[in-house]
Image (tube, grey):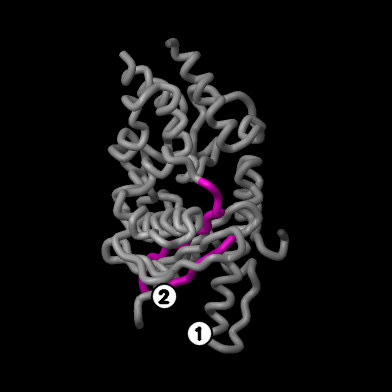
Amino acid sequence: MRRYLGERERAEHDAIGVRGKRGHLLGRIAIKDAVRLHRWRSVPGHAIWPVEIAVSHEPNGRPTVGEWPRVSVAHKDDVAVALVDDHADCGIDIERIEPRTAAFLAIAFTPGELALGAGREADEWYARLWAAKEAVGKARGTGITDPKQLEVRAAAGERLTIDDFTIDTRREGDYVIAWTRRLAS
Amino acid sequence: VTDEQILAVIERALVEIAGDEILITGPITPATSFNADLELESIEFVALAEKLQQQFGGSVDFVGWISKKELDQIIALTVGELVEFIASCRS
């Protein structure tokens, strides 16, 4: 933890409740490593230490590492993922693939979204839909309030569309990761 | 149904959704915040909405209620506000 968190960040980490602590630390590590890799790729040989990247939060909960690049983070269980974008606010999410009840589906998804998943593995599709909504909610900074308002209207393979967002998704073991696509520069 | 009974139903639902560890910092009270204290995730809100409908019937539209709120209100949302909402749906 000392390798990754600065003094202010350690104090913030200490103040977090038991439930969120592990995910918070994993998330910080994921953000910092994603930014480090991004810098290394943009300026080869430009190595920075994790503690040199100060992560803080905007009032809406969005993590920041300064003005640019924009970052997003998500975690589930013992896995954290982060996304870096030089051009726009971005969003990422990870969900566990697990069975959902009919009542859950009725609250979370529109009939159109469920129809789009025809022929796909059901539980995996639900995880993809939810992760895509969450990714867009994070990119917009609004989160998800009514999940049906962030409606997946098209799906081509692992690429989904919500309004003007394109979201890429990928299954990793028992999880699905979704992230808003980097705009062409 | 009293407010205390509604609170007990909410607490039981939260334990079913997130496990016993959600009570690790103490019992759920009206002042408990969904975000800062319970660190409830969006997908867990849907599970909570589902359980509240099972318990109190379809007139308790938790998602509809929450989606009318501003983001800062949602971030600050407490269990007490939810109790009040459920009580108002049933009166």
Instruction: Tell me which residue sits at (37%, 23%) in the image.
Output: B57
Q: Which residues are magenta?
A: A80-99
Amino acid type of the residue tagged 1 in the rendering: Ser
Residue A68 in view (yes/no): no
Instruction: Tell me which residue sits at (31%, 13%) in the image.
Output: B91
Residue A115 in view (yes/no): yes
Going by the picture, which residue comes out furthest to the right?
A: A2
A2 and A98: which one is in front? A98
In percent of width and height, residue A182 lies at: 40, 74
Q: Disc number at residue B7?
A: none
* Quarter residue A91 falls in: bottom left
In percent of width and height, residue B48 lies at: 47, 34
Going by the picture, which residue comes out furthest to the front?
A: A119
**Residue position for label 1:** A42
Q: Residues within 10 Å of mark 1 (few under 14, many from 20)?
A: few
Q: Verify whether residue A107 appears in magenta.
A: no
* Chain letter, disc 1 residue: A
Q: Relative to B2, say whether B52 is above or below.
A: below
A79 and A40: which one is in front? A79
Q: Relative to A35, say whether B78 is above or below.
A: above
Q: Count of labels shown?
A: 2
- Lower position in the chain sequence, tag 1 or tag 2: 1
Q: Relative to A50, say whether A111 is above or below.
A: above
In percent of width and height, residue A175 lies at: 57, 59
**Residue position for label 2:** A86
- Quadrant in which the C terminus of chain A appears: bottom left
Helix, strand or loop at disc 2? Answer: loop
Going by the picture, which residue comes out furthest to the top?
A: B2
